[in-house]
Image (cartoon, rainbow, N blue to C red):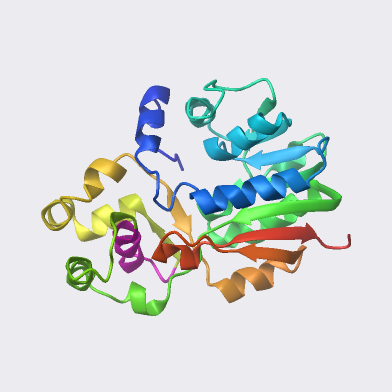
Amino acid sequence: MSYMLTEDEEDIAQEWQKYKGYTIRPLPSTLEFYDYVIKCAKRDAKNLLFGATPEIRSIFQRLERKVVMVDNSLSMVRAMGRLTIQQQAVSSNETFIPLDWLNLGFLDETFDFAIGDDAINMIGWDYFDAFLRNTAAALNPQGIFVCHLLLKPDDSLIDKTVDEVFTDYTRGLINNRHDLASMLNFICYDKSTWSMGWQQTINRIGREKLLAMAAELDFIGTFGKCNSRFCCPPRVEFETLVRRYFEISDCFFPQEYAYCAFEPVYVLAKNGR
């Protein structure tokens, strides 16, 4: 699945700038946490990055630490490079390997530190086990995996209607457009596949209704080209699966918005350290 409904690098970068504050990009408190955990790794650590999140790449660039990026989309990697502090498609501290995240066995080295912002959400639940197993195998015995993901929202949020969400917004119970966008995604959450996403929300609610009811959000203009679909499992199921391969060393929740209650960042230590 393509992240974006465009392959033009400049277009992707411009679209990505629209997503600041929304669930698809890390928030300031999350970035502070990323900065902390990356600094905790030894300076000569062998680092692995799932995807090409520009904010994480900028941390590695600022610290002058090498990182290997794995992704199956060169255009996405190059576009995100425009948004880093180096503003280059691929910077001198970066090595890009075109690779599906489920095929890490093709890497010819192992790593001390791995990080992925929403990366695991981009695959279906049936593949979570393979993702975690392969990530653990790609890490050295003392390896750490920093895993940010979206979890299943509470049923009370999923089971609301569109009208109820917009009533909450007009009454100030949802007090910003970032939470409004997430709440709209929540009511379009697919309980059978544990998934939600921008195009899924647009298709289920309908463009006309979104345009009429949330002109100030501009949901269509903001997310019309974003094709990211997130598999968001319940927390218990995810943590049970994680413990097959990792110990949970830390779990950080950002605080900026209400939707952050379902967006933890796990620090996972490889089992058998």
As for residue 184 lying within the magenta part, the answer is yes
223 w.r.t. 267: above or below = above
* Residues rendered magenta in the picture: 179-192
The image position of residue 168, as x and y in percent, is 22, 71
Q: Is residue 70 at least partly visible in the picture?
A: yes
View extreme (bottom): residue: 156
Seen at 58% across and 53% down, the residue is: 120
The image position of residue 148, as x and y in percent, is 58, 55
Instruction: Judge by depth and name the residue closer to the eye, 160 or 97.
Output: 160
Seen at 60% across and 76% down, the residue is: 236
Position of 170 with respect to 185 (left or right) is left
Position of 73 with respect to 23 (left or right) is right
The image position of residue 113, as x and y in percent, is 76, 45
As for residue 3 lying within the magenta part, the answer is no
Q: Quadrant of residue 154?
A: bottom left
118 w.r.t. 204: above or below = above
243 w.r.t. 19: above or below = below
Seen at 88% across and 62% down, the residue is: 272
SS assignment for the magenta stretch, majority: helix
Q: Is residue 102 at least partly visible in the picture?
A: no
Seen at 21% across and 60% down, the residue is: 205
How many marks the image carries: the answer is: 0
Instruction: Judge by depth and name the residue closer to the eye, 65 or 8.
Output: 65
Position of 269 with respect to 235 (left or right) is right
Position of 188 with respect to 239 (left or right) is left
Location of the C terminus by quadrant is bottom right
The image position of residue 219, as x and y in percent, is 24, 49
